[in-house]
Image (cartoon, rainbow, N blue to C red):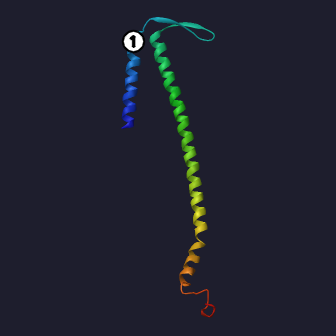
Amino acid sequence: MKVQWIVISALLFALITAVFAVINVEAVQVNFLFTQTKTPLILVILASTLLGGLTVGLFGITRQFKMKRHIRKLENEVSDLSATIASLESPIVPFMKQEDHNDDFDPEPESLK
């Protein structure tokens, strides 16, 4: 359901941007650092939208890779800790079995009671 809302929002944003760009077709002067050029405003709007989308996408992909790496690290840590727990619990099992056999053992003999 979340993906559907994202797609609908993206299409709505694209439609609004396209309408806004088509309305603004006159040529404008764009100043770069070392040069100036006259281009239609529609190209400036579409290029700005495209560059903004690519920038957001790049940051999103970078964040996703970092999260996957962090998840992989945590999964390795969980498996290491599970192995440690298993190795620490293994000596307890024979002791517990030995304790079951000694239920009738009375540490205090009758003569001392």
Under tag 1, what secondary structure? Answer: helix
Is 53 above or below relative to 95? above
| Residue bearing the label numbered 1 | 22
Q: Residue at x 39, y 10 (%)?
A: 23
* Count of marks overlaid on the render: 1
**Image side of residue 113 versus residue 61, left or right:** right
Q: Position of residue 77 (x, y in %)?
A: 59, 54
Q: Residue at x 55, y 42 (%)?
A: 67
**Residue 64 vs residue 81, the one in the foreground:** 81
Q: Residue at x 55, y 36 (%)?
A: 63
Q: Position of residue 24 (x, y in %)?
A: 42, 9
Inspect the image, locate mark 1, and give the three-letter code of the amino acid beneath it: Val
Q: Quadrant of residue 110?
A: bottom right
Q: Residue at x 62, y 12 (%)?
A: 33
Is 1 above or below relative to 85? above
Quadrant the N terminus occupies: top left
Q: Quadrant of residue 8?
A: top left
Q: Position of residue 68 (x, y in %)?
A: 54, 43
Q: Position of residue 65 (x, y in %)?
A: 55, 39
**Residue 90 vs residue 99, the one in the foreground:** 99
Quadrant the C terminus occupies: bottom right
